[in-house]
Image (cartoon, grey):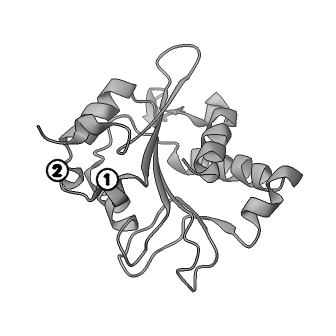
Amino acid sequence: MDKCVIDLLSAVTQVNRRYFNAVGTRQDQTQYPQVTENSFSAELYHRFSNLMELNINMTYYDNLFFQFDITKMAYGIRPDLVLHEAQENRNNQKMFVEVKTDSNADLTDDFNKLINATDNYLNFENVVMITVNRKYGELLNLVRQHHGFFNLEDSRKDRIYFINVDTTNDKPQYDIFSLRYNRKLNRN
């Protein structure tokens, strides 16, 4: 697992709970859940950027840019966060990050984004999906059921990671797994 994925997990654990979910109030005073994906991603961007700027990390992150909500035109996909050399080239495509905070969101399109990010054109070294407000077992089952992962080459599976933040208890539970280490994803 590359240093940037470990640092990303560290940054996720630094995001305050208030960015995990929010409740809005309608004019009639009834409340409803609000999606917090953008505010969570922005806070994660801030936390990860701070880690990048530490003296101990300067060499690793030298000549890399961490960008928020940028479009990859070749596929028309828009990752939430990207760590790379530059938008105008495909050199040093370090990390592609997709974030979901809605516990009911259909993840099919997002899973396909992860697959596309590992292909020969985009060729990201690390592809990470962060899910917040889901139980770990639920995410694991969704990943296991996604047919696009079944026939993916091992070299591409090696680069896909999942970070899950289960917020059902008072203290968040953080889990990380990859297609590489979770061989149960293969059909038997």
* Residue at numbered disc 2: 147
Q: Is residue 36 left or right of residue 85?
A: left
Q: Is residue 172 left or right of residue 182?
A: right
Task: Provide residue 141's location: percent of width, then percent of height.
Answer: 25, 32
Secondary structure of the residue carrying numbered label 1? helix
Task: Please give the name of the residue rendered at 44% of the width and 67% of the height, measured from the top-left corner.
Answer: 78
Q: Residues within 10 Å of mark 2 (few under 14, many from 20)?
A: some
Please tell me whether mark 2 or mark 1 is closer to you in this view.
Answer: 2
Task: Provide residue 150's location: percent of width, then percent of height.
Answer: 19, 50
Residue 127 visible in the displayed image: yes
* Residue at numbered disc 1: 111
Task: Provide residue 33's location: percent of width, then percent of height.
Answer: 44, 33
Instruction: State how far apart marks 2 and 1 are (Cα).
Output: 10 Å
Q: Is residue 153 left or right of residue 101?
A: left
159 up-or-down from 185: above or below: below
Nearest the viewer among 33 and 50 is 50
Q: Residue furthest top?
A: 170
174 up-or-down from 159: above or below: above
* Amino acid at dot 2: His
Q: Residue furthest bottom?
A: 88
Nearest the viewer among 152 and 127 is 152
Q: Residues within 10 Å of mark 1 (few under 14, many from 20)?
A: many
Q: In which quadrant will I find the C terminus?
A: top left
Q: Is residue 9 left or right of residue 52?
A: left
- Residue 177's quadrant in the figure? top left
Secondary structure of the residue carrying numbered label 2? helix
